[in-house]
Image (cartoon, helix red, strand yellow):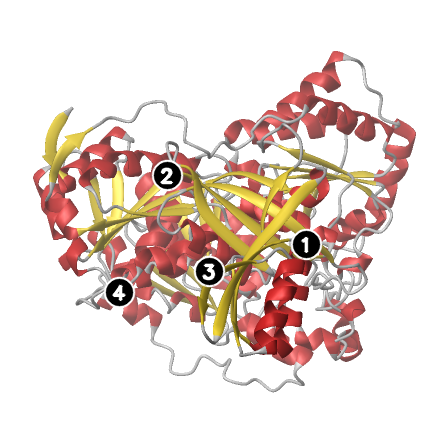
Amino acid sequence: MTEMTGAEMVIEALADQGVEHIFGYPGGAVLPIYDALFQSQDRVRHILVRHEQGAVHAAEGYARSTGKVGCVLVTSGPGATNAVTGLTDALCDSIPLVVLTGQVPTHLIGNDAFQECDTVGITRPCTKYNYLVKNIADLPSALHEAFHIASSGRPGPVVVDIPKDIQFAKGAYSRPKEFQHKGYRPKVQGDPDKIKQAVEMIAAAKRPVFYTGGGVVNSGRKASELLRELVKLTGIPITSTLMGLGAFPAADPQWLGMLGMHGTWEANWAMHDCDLMICIGARFDDRITGRLDAFSPGSKKIHVDIDPSSINKNVKVDLPIVGDCANVLDQMLRLWRSKPQQIDKKALAAWWDQIGKWRAKKSLAFHNSKDIIKPQYAIQRLFELTKDRDTYITTEVGQHQMWAAQFYQFQEPNRWMTSGGLGTMGYGLPASVGVQLAHPDSLVIDIAGEASVMMTMQEISTAVQYELPVKIFILNNKYMGMVRQWQELLHGGRYSHSYSEALPDFVKLADAYHAHGIRCENPGELDDKIREMIEVKKPVIFDCVVDPAENCFPMIPSGRAHNEMLLGDAAGKIEDAVTEQGKMLV
Amino acid sequence: MDTATTHYPAAGASERVETRTLCVLVDNEPGVLARVIGLFAGRGYNIDSLTVSETEHQKHLSRITIVTRGTPMVLEQIKNQLDRLVPVHRVVDLTTTGPAIARELAMVKVRGTGDQRMEALRLADAFRARVIDATTESFVFEITGASDKIESFINLMLPVGLVEVSRTGVVAIARGPEGM
């Protein structure tokens, strides 16, 4: 028990929790903590961002690429409100974060003081948990609990709001110890009876499919390894959500590609026609199911999830298993191996034949061009030229994100950082800063759209300051592409405010930021310029000028069943494909 | 909007709506009630009645009784969503776990003179309501019981000169020797 100030406790707790980097932005209500940081720079390294939203996304990128808790430090009032988008993003995608916010001194709380806001009130619905520490004696336990809650169970962001007088106050610091929270005990082990039932159901299935999600990635490296083993052992096809890409290698023949609104023909049809769906760490999101009453009508469903509230939320399942993916997969594998389970090989072969027919549709096919860069082609080339390197990909949100998911082949987990649940434009650039900081020698690329990247463009300045050579690969189609696509398909081609007017010259912009700018307008030059981007040892803004008219297919139109996909060639029939009611949906 | 064309859950249009009484054991800490209420408001669940008070002072535990309505799927969601709040220790559905008793307390103010006063006292007697305040022109009755009993008492008081009512909302507990 050592006596120290609240601000010193913060640094002490961060160090004790193994935090090496914290992303933040100073301000009046956190000055004591910044002072403590100044005096102990060797313990925790602070990364100065350009906007608090960027700090949270950077911490998310850091967390997702390492599996560690991401940390943020911001001031009261606008510092906290600017962090809200990032907090909500982290909550939707289950990313472990601890966000420290300054607060006005306790005696001023509720007085509408300068830069005061009700941080715990504002962040209550967008955090897993939050604290307002009004007593110095509560600070050490609040900080340690925050890390425990953020990283255990279904991970999520935790806010600790620390008034300025508490940062100055002196008290006794206590180290983190293995403690049992009063009431919070996530269930991580699957119920053995249900595991047994699940294994029996898998063995009896004729047309099974694995449907996996971000829960596998969140569960850690081990979960991906176990998943691979189980999929290999059973010979069952596997598809994944946007969030789960990389948990199973895209190069594997059992991989069907991503499913959902922009998923492959074979993945969505397999989900529709299967007789057993084994959902592991995914949540039957509306982007996956399409019209609910037509979702996989003939299948039994097993759902493994660490969060009981994800089960039976949208889709009624036959066998719910609450537990951590790695534990449950391990339990399933052990049982599968303990007695020679025989899956019906003949039925499975027939199922694979059917899948082969769906694959033959080549649903991701596109017409390439010699004159203009097709966005799909740009991603294909980017993948080919970076696949043998140690590469991490982040994205913004929109068409480019879906093309990245479709055409960049992820072989490993934690290599793909994208805003899935919230769909936050402006996520990718700051996230790439966080990823690059955690992996200084790796190649970190933000596959971006020109509209999204403008939302947090200022973070390129952070990358330059800390010599983080992130590559901002902009598929520039001069439109908010996904908005434009929906306007084309659903709103009679009335492109209301989706044109990116008055775009900056991205090469000059890169220059202005002391980064490196590259523009590519010709398919023939693409490879060389991508190589140049990889070779340059500083942040790069790559302005890849692509076909502005290209649409992202396959697509499940709003209000349609998940097997009623539009394909690229079906573009002529699109008008009939979307009903009036479908237009109401997002 | 035609539910068949939406990919969102069909707001229980085809399923029957049930009423449930939930008991929630929570840490008595600042903001815990806001978390519970915020959950109901944010996710569009109904609250028919909500009561809360610290029940175990040593452990700083409060007990919240919530009466809510929804389809079976929504009710399961409500319980799971409550259960995953960090300060929530337990959620028990008293309606489904076995026989339970639910009671409410109300204070009913009635104003009147002459026969009206006599009628008010006679009705109060029939309902076993107690007089807890009296003036020459008014009474305040205290009545305890199931919600529908209180409802009928209040309805009867209306023509007699009902001024206002204050109700606690429902508190409930399971029958038998076991705790929640």
Depicted A334 relative to depicted B170: above or below: above
In front of the other: A97 or A564: A97
Left or right: where does residue A91 sit relative to residue A344? left
Left or right: where does residue A452 sit relative to residue A571? left
Q: Chain of mark 4?
A: A
In front of the other: A107 or B132: B132
In front of the other: A516 or A71: A71
Query: Which-is-in-front pick, marks 3 and 4?
Result: 4
Residue lying at the far top of the rendered structure: A338
**Mark 2 or 3 closer to N-term?**
2
Residue at screen point 78% across, 73% down: B2
Mark 2–mark 1 distance (CA, rounded to whole Å): 33 Å
Which x, y percent locates residue A441? 33, 38
Question: Quick one: label 1, few (<14), some, or many (20+) residues within 10 Å?
Answer: many
Task: Look at the numbered disc 1 and give the secondary structure of its residue.
Answer: helix
Q: Give, as a three-letter code, the residue at label 3.
A: Glu
Mark 1–mark 3 distance (CA, rounded to whole Å): 34 Å
Would you identify the image quadrant in which residue B71 lies? bottom right
**Residue B74 shows which numbered tag?**
1
Residue lying at the far front of the rendered structure: B114
Mark 3 in CB contact with mark 4 (< 8 angstroms): no
Q: Give, as a three-letter code, the residue at label 4.
A: Pro
